[in-house]
Structures are given as C-alpha cells and as structure tokens.
Image: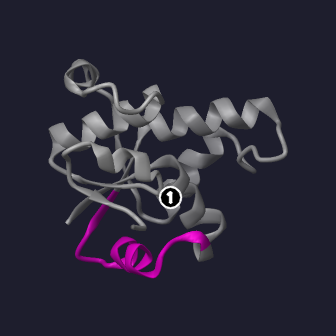
Amino acid sequence: MRLLLDTHVAMWALTEPRRIAPKIFEAIGDPENKVTVSAVAVWEVAIKHRLARPDSPPFSGHETISYFERVGFASLEVTAAHVAMVERLPPLHADPLDRLMLAQAIIEVMLFVTYDRNLSRYDVPLLTWS
C-alpha cells in the first residue's frame, strides 16, 4: 500500500505513537507499505511551531524534515496538479491544508491516513480510526 500520512498522524508516529490506533500503527510499520508525508505537513508543523502555543509541535519544520527522513518516511512535494485538484473537492471540510493533502492522495493514488473523521465524508480511500 502507498500511504500518505496526515500531519497529526505523522507527528504522533514520531512523538506519541500510543495515540495511533493499532491497525494504523501496523500499516505504518509494515515494510511492504510505502509511507509518505507531504511537504504540506512540514508547512503545517512550521506554522504551528512558530506560534509557540502549549499544543505546538515540539520541533521546527526544519527538524521535522530530518525526523521524517530518519524514520524512513518518503516526502511528497506539492505540484500544480495537486493544487488544482482542490477545486474539484466538494466544500465538506474547511481546513485548506487537509484538503490539499487529500487532493495529493487522490492524484497520487494513495491511501490517506488521518484521525480526522470529517474527511471520511469525501468519497476517497482513507485509513482512519473509525
């Protein structure tokens, strides 16, 4: 399987793996699966880290890149086709970063791994807790 991890799932894999459902944790750890994170996830970490709130990620966007590489996550850059695909998605979810990652998963034919159950309203392949 080709998996694209949502930002929360990717961060939890690094910092709080106990928050990840066992079936999803197994899929991420399966060497037969290609696990990928989007440049959008790094962008989201960088934004939230800079806010320095109590719930902000514990490391910067630059550090996140290194951590993702160390655990073997592949990186997915954003293309014009990914961005254009967002306009084809119905307005079921307001978070533009999630919508962009979802568009990437559609175009790249990947299973989007997310904790956000609201994204299950889209008719696309998801791996989620429910």
Give the amino acid at mark 1: Val
Q: Is residue 20 magenta?
A: yes
Q: Position of residue 125 (x, y in %)?
A: 21, 54
Check disc 1 and report the residue beneath it.
9
Answer left or right for 71 relative to 14. Answer: left
Q: Depth check: 97 or 123 in front?
A: 123
Residue at the image point whose x is 84% and y is 45% from the top = 54
* Residue in view at x 54 percent, y 66 percent: 13
Q: From the viewer's perspective, tell me whether residue 19 is left or right of residue 73.
A: right
| 18 is higher (above) or lower (below) than 49 | below
Q: Quadrant of the C terminus?
A: bottom left
User: Within 10 Å of the Cα at label 1, are there few (<14), some (14-19), or many (20+) other Cα atoms?
Assistant: many
Secondary structure category for the residue under label 1: helix
At 40% from the left edge and 73% from the top edge, which residue is drawn? 24
Residue drawn at 24 percent across, 28 percent down: 89
Quarter of the rendering occupied by the N terminus: bottom left
Residue 59 drawn in magenta? no
* Magenta-tinted stretch: 19-35
Colour approach in the figure = one colour
Where 21 falls versus 74 (above or below)? below
Q: In x, y percent, where is residue 115?
A: 47, 57
